[in-house]
Image (cartoon, rainbow, N blue to C red):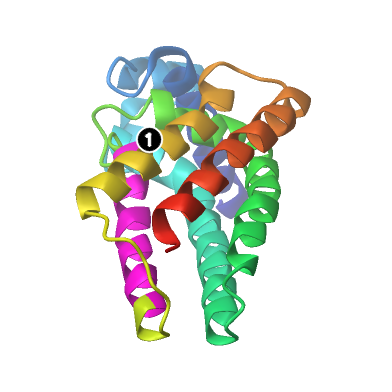
Amino acid sequence: MGSSYEKTHSDILKSAKKNFMENGFERSNLRKICKDANITTGAFYRHFEDKEAVFIEIVSPVLAELKKMYLESEKESYNILENSEIEKIWDVNQNGIMPFIEFIYDNYSEIKLLLLSSDGTKYENFLHDISEIETKKTLKYINAMRKKGYKVHDISEKEIHMIVQAYFSSVFEVVVHDYTKEDAIAYTKTLVKFFAPGWKNILSD
């Protein structure tokens, strides 16, 4: 019984993911998802409360891993600040993007769902939401820099958000336009070369 339940659960996830990728969340029909999974709608509701619950289960592991990566990067940034080696922060930004690109391509379909097929779910503002988180973290880091005695130019939260969202939007273009991984790596290196000096010029006195 257990294996049968697990198989049905897996079949629902596979069918839903395929339908979400092809049609987007809002336009995906629950009956079609069930039909492609060879189950009844009654069987579906023994596994999931609704269509969004399926979407959440598909993307949740990727979001958890993304959060873990972010926390590790944040920890490294604060270690650099604590050791008064602030110039190394720009190296972290440049070197840190490659693991992020690896992460994107290891979880390509889920990232694409979040970016292009999440309308109607709680993740429909995925890009804005992660930009907002990064904006708050950047403001916090700027304040920490000032407490350590670094002179930092005044910059508003709105300005930081604008720059952060422009950066994330640019990085995720590799998914939106289906870049090969090789092209994405080359493109992103150019992107970092463009943004890193800009941040340095804005923040450093």
Q: Quadrant of residue 128?
A: top left
Q: Give x and y (percent) for residue 145.
A: 41, 76
Q: Is residue 196 visible?
A: yes
In the image, taking residue 31 as reference, residue 169 lies left or right, namely right
Q: Give x and y (percent) for residue 50.
A: 27, 37
In magenta segment, residue 168: no
Q: Given the image, on which type of amino acid does mark 1 rest?
A: Ala
Quarter of the image with the C terminus in it: bottom left
For label 1, the residue is 43
Which secondary structure lies at badge 1? helix
Residue in the foreground of this view, choosing between 76 and 190: 190
Residue in the foreground of this view, choosing between 54 and 43: 54
Q: Decide: is 74 above or below 144.
A: above
Residue in the foreground of this view, choosing between 122 and 69: 69
In the image, taking residue 157 as reference, residue 195 lies left or right, namely right
Instruction: Name, please, the residue furthest toward the front.
Output: 205
- At horizontal 48% and vertical 20% (from top left) the residue drawn is 21
Q: Give x and y (percent) for residue 179.
A: 65, 20
- At horizontal 27% and vertical 55% (from top left) the residue drawn is 155
Q: Decide: is 95 above or below 28.
A: below
